Structures are given as structure tokens and as C-alpha cells.
Image (cartoon, rainbow, N blue to C red):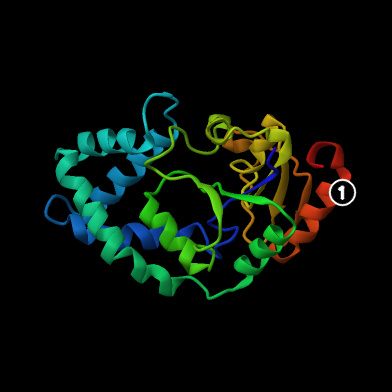
Amino acid sequence: MSKVLMFDLDGTLLPVQPEFFIHDYPEAAAPYFAEFMEAGAFKEALFKSTWDMVNNLDPHALNIDVFGQCFERRVGVKWERLWPIFERFYDEGFPKLRELVPESQLARKVVQACLDQGWELVLATNALFPEKAVRERMRWCGVDDLPWKFISTLEDMHFCKPHIQYYQEMVDILGLDPRRCIMIGNDVQEDMVASRLGMKTILVEDFCIDRGDSSGSGSFQPDMRGRLEEVPELVSEIYEANKHLFG
């Protein structure tokens, strides 16, 4: 059976702060929707619809459908007219945000080192973005052409982090034993929660996020923690200590 590393993307492999998604991303997208609303109204609809999607736990509703229904309701325009505008932004505007993200080859070196250890790879980024936007960000940190077994996207998933159902869905899709998986991420509440399924966890501290118990999600102790450059070594340590599971 497969032994799998699940990597978060933003703030883990991609050196980016939350402000990128709170400020830079919506600022760049808003002008594309100027025909229908002012920038402030767009941002409010975007954030509230995303929040509704994150908190949806209907196993029959894809994330993209939940977001589309919520965004359509708030904007008062049919989703069939809005989605092509999002797609045009992701084709034309989103790639220009690359200049706001520091250049780094570290992510590729780290992931390649883990591949060389014999691990299979899953990109367990929060399923808030369509595939083209996920793959664009993967290009920014040089991991887009590596052999990923699965990439979580807006179109494919029914759940989001921090809900444990997000991880359970990937386990079910891929037929994995969660005890043979290691989740690697920078967010205590969103990534380390995978431990509830029996996954081992590594907290990447370069851009660490910890909302504490005030988040309502609880706090989770990682099996290992360290900087991104240390991940291959930390993975090896977890493997050596749990050969009865991974061997």
C-alpha cells in the first residue's frame, strides 16, 4: 500500500503570507467584475461566499457549486455569467501576481528529496481555488511538473480545511490508509487537524499560522516541526520511528 506525503501549498511550499489572499488577490480580481459591482461589494461577496463554502458539509455539493450559488445570490447575477469572468481573471490577471511572491527553488528541492525517499505525493491545498489557479501557484514555486498523485481543487472536492471531512475525502478518493500518510503544512488548525484521522503531521514554521483555541477548531500538536528545508529529514525521522506502519 502507498506511503504518501500530503503537502499544503500556500505558506508551506509557496512563500506567501495570508495578506496575499486577503488583499492582493481580491484587489486584482475586482476590476474584472466592475460591470456588475464596485470593488468593495465584490470583495464582500467573495469573502462571504468563500466562508459559506468552507462551512458547507453537504457531501453531495461540490465546492464550486456551493460557492457559485452563494456568490450568485449575493451579487444578483446568474453564475453562468459570472464564472467565465473568474476564468478570464485566472487566465489573464492571476498570473501577474507572480511578481508579489519571492523567487525560491527550495520547495522543488524539498519535494524532490522526498520523492527520492520513495514517497508518493498529494497536494493538499485548501480547495478554495480552481485547478488553473492551483497549478499557477505550483509553477511559482517550481513543483508543477512533479508527479503528484492528486491535487485538491475547487472543482473536485466537497469539503474544505479545517474540516476533517476534507482529509477523509482525499483518503477515500485515493484508497489510502491514513496511518501511512504524513500531512505537511504551516497552519496548526487547518493542517495538523489531519492527525485526527491517524496521519502523522509536520508543522512547517517558515510562515506558521496558529489561531489558538480562539479559532474554535482547537489546537493540535504536530509530530515534528521545523523549517521547510528540514522537511526531508523530519520525514525520515517519522519513517524510522514508525517502520511498522510505513515499511
Residue ID at (61%, 48%): 187
184 to the left or right of 169: right
Residue ID at (41%, 62%): 136
Q: Mark 1 points at which residue?
A: 240
**What is the quadrant of the C terminus in the image?**
top right
Residue ID at (63%, 34%): 176
Q: Which of 116 and 82 is in front in this view?
A: 116
Q: In this view, does 149 lie above or below 227?
A: above
Percent position of residue 56, x then y: 42, 29
Percent position of residue 210, x then y: 64, 47
Q: Is residue 213 above or below residue 231?
A: above
50 to the left or right of 37: right
Kind of residue at badge 1: Glu
Q: Quadrant of residue 55?
A: top left
192 to the left or right of 140: right
36 to the left or right of 133: left
Percent position of residue 9, x then y: 54, 55
For label 1, the SS is helix
Percent position of residue 170, x then y: 54, 36
